[in-house]
Image (cartoon, rainbow, N blue to C red):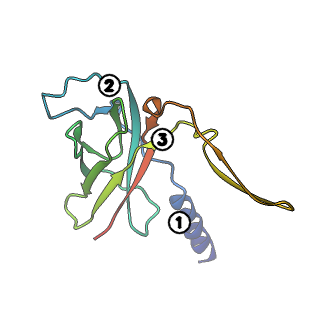
Amino acid sequence: MRIFTLSLVLLTTLASCAPPLPIADYIADARSPNAKITTQPLRFDVITLRSFVAGDRQERPGARCQISTSDQRLSATFQTPAQLRVPLYKGTPAPINGYCHLPGTNLAARFTLDAINQSAPENEGVRLTLGSGGPRIGATISLRDRSKDRYGYPASLRITLAP
């Protein structure tokens, strides 16, 4: 009985540390459903999406997902685990809104994925210095061109499905 209990504890421990599930050999493309958008993307980001059930550390494959942006620049449907290739255009990218559900269950999730400004905000802001001579205020003005800021989406997203 003791060996069985030890084996069960070891198996449970190993199951909670299971490696991520493999992703299909293709990358799904998020494309514009709006034919009027003719702007060429500057580059593409790849986002890895994985689904889990709330309170469980084990990855659950097969969640069916849909994403889109409010500006109609992209939309896609896919099944987790997946890698999604997202186009990035000039300017600040719109947030990606998504919905996933696990077929045959009442488990679902809504999420929003915001782009992150990856440009370094160097030499910006206002400084307040207190010294023996009294308070001093100093300002630093940035001369960088914010229109050239580089944005990107996170490289991975963990989708937590709940009832």
User: Residue 70 location in percent, x, y?
Assistant: 22, 46
Which label sits in the foreground, 2 or 1? 2
Could you tell me which secondary element the residue under label 2 belongs to?
Answer: loop
Q: Position of residue 53 (x, y in %)?
A: 37, 64
Report the side of 28 relative to 13 (left or right).
Answer: left
Query: Cβ–Cβ below 8 Å for labels 2 and 1?
Result: no
The answer to whether residue 96 is seen in the rendering is yes
Q: Tell whether 84 sits left or right of 117.
A: left
- Please tell me whether mark 1 sits on a helix, a strand or a loop: helix
Q: Nearer the viewer, residue 101 or 104?
A: 101
| Residue at the (36%, 34%) spot, across then down | 91
Residue 20, horizontal then vertical, whole percent? 47, 47
Residue annotated with mark 3: 117
Give the residue at mark 1: 12
Q: Is residue 115 above or below residue 89?
A: below
Q: Which residue is mark 2?
A: 41
